[in-house]
Image: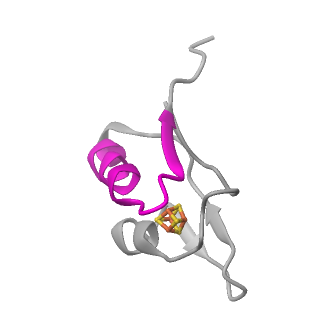
């Protein structure tokens, strides 16, 4: 499973960054980057919360092909 952002929806308000700074990073020119896409067990809860809290609905957890 991985976390993805829809850049057409993201408004770079930093809500996800506040929740998980080691996954989401805002650049100086307000561009969001995801620096760790993989949803590990340790991060599952916080990434699920980030997707739920994103005011733009821009974050999704998607299944990855196991092969
Ligand atoms: S919380 Fe949503 S809208 Fe805000 S920076 Fe993160 S992905 Fe973008």
Residue 33 falls left or right of residue 48 = right
- Quarter-of-image position of residue 50: bottom left
User: What residue is shown at x 30% (from left), y 52% (from top)?
Assistant: 49
Residue 25 falls left or right of residue 15 = right
Looking at the image, residue 13 lies above or below residue 9: below
User: What residue is shown at x 44% (from left), y 40% (from top)?
Assistant: 39
Indicate the position of residue 37 as horizontal and vertical percent values.
57, 46
Residue 29 falls left or right of residue 45 = right
Image quarter where the C terminus lies is: top right
Residue lying farthest top?
A: 67
Q: Is 55 in the magenta?
A: yes
* Residue placed most toward the observer, 46 or 6: 6
User: What residue is shown at x 42% (from left), y 63% (from top)?
Assistant: 55
Looking at the image, residue 28 lies above or below residue 5: below
Which color scheme is applied?
Answer: one colour
Q: Main secondary structure of the magenta part?
A: helix
Looking at the image, residue 29 lies above or below residue 1: below
Instruction: Count up the numbered dots.
Output: 0
* Residue placed most toward the observer, 23 or 54: 54
User: What residue is shown at x 60% (from left), y 58% (from top)?
Assistant: 34
Indicate the position of residue 28 as horizontal and vertical percent values.
68, 88
Indicate the position of residue 54 as horizontal and vertical percent values.
42, 60
* Residue placed most toward the observer, 30 or 11: 11
Indicate the position of residue 44 as horizontal and vertical percent values.
33, 42
Residue lying farthest bottom?
A: 28
Start and end of the magenta stretch?
42-61
Q: Is 48 in the magenta?
A: yes
């Amino acid at each position: 499973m991985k976390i993805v952002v829809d850049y057409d929806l993201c408004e770079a308000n930093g809500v996800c960054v506040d929740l998980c700074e080691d996954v989401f990073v805002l650049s100086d020119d307000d561009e969001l980057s995801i620096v760790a896409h993989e949803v590990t067990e340790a991060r599952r809860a916080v990434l699920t919360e980030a997707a739920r809290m994103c005011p733009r609905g821009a974050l999704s957890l998607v299944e990855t092909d196991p092969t």
